[in-house]
Amino acid sequence: MPKLSIIIPVYRMNLTLQQCLASIRRTVRIPYEVIVVDDGAPDGEEALFDAHATDDMRLLRATEHRGMAHALSVGLQAAEGDVMLFLHADVMLAPHTVEDMLDVLITRPEIGAVSAVAMRMHEHRRFCPQPSYSGWENFAAAAEQMRAAGHAPHPTLYLELFCLMTRRDVVMAAGLPDEDYRTPCVTAIDYTLRMTRAGVSAGNPAVRICASSRERSCARARDI
């Protein structure tokens, strides 16, 4: 079984990090490490990051705020796993998310990367019908219902990085993210396009997560 390196770039998102880490511990059933990269948090927030530290998590700190591309590069260079999972700090993994993504990468070697889809999206960018849920159990049930539909991965040129899994060989071929791109969405476009030169990227509509970042116009209100 391959080892998974989960890389979480964080900048002023310590309030959501705890939920993100809790969902990892609840749902990931393969050997893994968590690398949290603090992208230059303001003074006074370091203690909050330290409070999340556990034996299965490494915390790396940048001396200044240099953007997501730099934070991902720091995490990638420290990662020991055969498979990488890029994860935003406001993402909650549903049950089976990691194993379903990993299954695609193992059984479909022509696919270089897979991504999940946020269950709640802004109404103008909705990828799927908005589910109604509150609490972990309802969230997990809604995700399982969508998973049961069994949609196959479909090829795409561009994947977002908020929940993206890829193999080490693809990362080595694509190189590190370009730190000249400071905007997260531009970083995602550039990096995943470079990944397609090493493999075939694929979105996986049967895999769902919960995300709250304004960057992707996701709904923030939730009480999980």
Image (tube, rainbow, N blue to C red):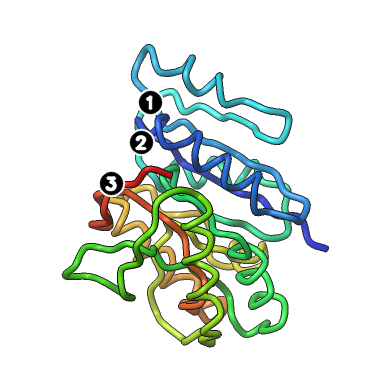
Q: Nearer the viewer, residue 149 or 177?
A: 149
* Nearest to N terminus: mark 3 or mark 2: 2
Residue 103, percent from left and from top = 69, 75
Q: What is the distance, in whole Å, between disc 1 and disc 2 at their CAs?
A: 6 Å
In the image, which is nearer the foreground, mark 3 or mark 2? Answer: 3
Tell whether label 2 touches label 1 (CB within 8 Å). yes
Residue assigned mark 3: 221
Task: Tell me if residue 140 comes above or below residue 67 in the rendering.
Answer: below
Residue assigned mark 1: 64
Residue 155, percent from left and from top = 46, 86
From the viewer's perspective, tell me whether residue 149 is left or right of residue 79: left
User: Dividing the image into 4 quarters, which one contains the N terminus?
Assistant: bottom right
Task: Count how many numbered circles sit on residues in the image.
Answer: 3
* Nearest to N terminus: mark 3 or mark 1: 1
Task: Tell me if residue 39 comes above or below residue 164 in the rendering.
Answer: above
Q: Indicate the amino acid at tag 3.
A: Ala
Tell whether label 2 touches label 3 (CB within 8 Å). no
Crowdedness of circle 3 by 10 Å Cα count: few (<14), some, many (20+)?
few
Residue assigned mark 2: 66
Q: From this viewpoint, is residue 202 visible?
A: yes
User: Dividing the image into 4 quarters, which one contains the C terminus?
Assistant: top left
